Amino acid sequence: MKRIVIATDGSANAEEAAWLLSHLPHRDRLEITIATVIHPPSYSYRAQPVESWLEDLLKRERDAAEQSAARIRDMFEGANVSIDHVAPRGSAGPEIVRIAEQTNADLVVIGARGHSTVSRIMLGSTSDYVATHAPCSVLVVRPTGLAKQPRQVRITVGYEDSGPARAAIEELRDTHWGKAADVSLVSVVPYWPGMYGELEPDPELSGRATEHLTELASELAPHVAKASCHVIEGQHIGEALVRFAEDKRSDLVVAGETPRGLLGRLLMGSVSRYVLRHAPCSVWITRNRMIEGLKSSSSNSE
């Protein structure tokens, strides 16, 4: 993970997203692009007073963007990073995705909501768009108190025996969290109809899930402070993961995502979308390893 786009609108939520990134450990030099999209109002009436007001508005927006970028630069003072700032005009979601494509980004970091959203948990339209369409992994940040009271990061990783889930574990491991992370590996086992029609968990599925999680915990152990295994029961995987994250007071949920093309754009799976919209904490949608695998398969088949 070397090329990162930080999307900001100058809001406290956006700058907390940048703060979280600045506190993630990294070994390689990071190439960071701060993206502030200026969305000017459109007016068909081109009288001089309106045009003058519009130019003044754009100048204030550009000045505010530079000030926000300067605050983010300060967060990385002394770190092994290079930082660029771009402030294009346009619609925020598509512009951020375009910048991620243009910079060949490995990760986009964005606040869950900006200036316009009133709910504490509600996902803003821009972050929803970016998480759905970005051609790379996306970290959507919701504040959980880490900035005010630094401590180990509590991470919940949703796991099933699949390529995206395995890729998510690899991407998490490669972040080099060290002693900064307490990781909970979670598998959700669905209920099945019993002999008398009652719903009950499948012990065979629970046993296999426990074996997989134990192996993964051993792999992660050298890279994090703690890795624990949890097999839980539930009919809806996304809902069960969110409930677990709430009970554990997690700071971050990690969900693996399979890129699926529709007219050249990405689609998000139902579990990832549910977690993204309902988790009370930050969500990391991991795509990079799966995208690399798809590109490799495509090259080998040609």
Image (tube, rainbow, N blue to C red):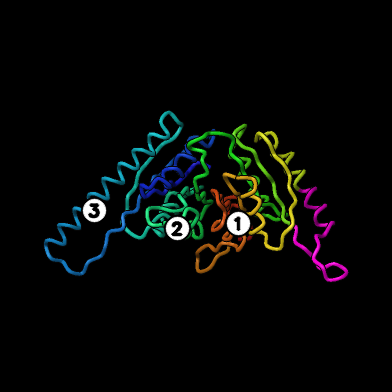
* Of the pair 253 and 69, the residue shown nearer to us: 253
Instruction: Look at the image and say whether residue 170 sits in the magenta stretch.
Output: no
> Magenta span covers which residues?
189-212
Residue at the extreme bottom: 197
Mark 1: amino acid: Glu
Identify the residue under disc 1.
257
Identify the residue under disc 3.
58
Instruction: Look at the image and say whether residue 192 sits in the magenta stretch.
Output: yes
Identify the residue under disc 2.
124
**Distance between mark 1 and mark 2 Cα atoms:** 20 Å
Residue 64, position as x, y percentages in the image: 29, 46
Q: How many marks?
A: 3
Residue 246, position as x, y percentages in the image: 61, 50
Few, some or many residues within 10 Å of mark 2 (<14, 14–19, 20+):
some
User: Does label 1 or label 3 sit earlier along the sequence?
Assistant: 3
* Whether residue 201 is situated above or below residue 106 in the rendered picture: below
Q: Secondary structure at mark 2?
A: loop
Mark 3: amino acid: Leu
Few, some or many residues within 10 Å of mark 1 (<14, 14–19, 20+):
many
| Residue under the point 43% across and 49% down | 103
Q: Secondary structure at mark 1?
A: loop
| Residue under the point 60% across and 61% down | 302
Q: Are marks 1 and 2 in contact (CB under 8 Å)?
A: no
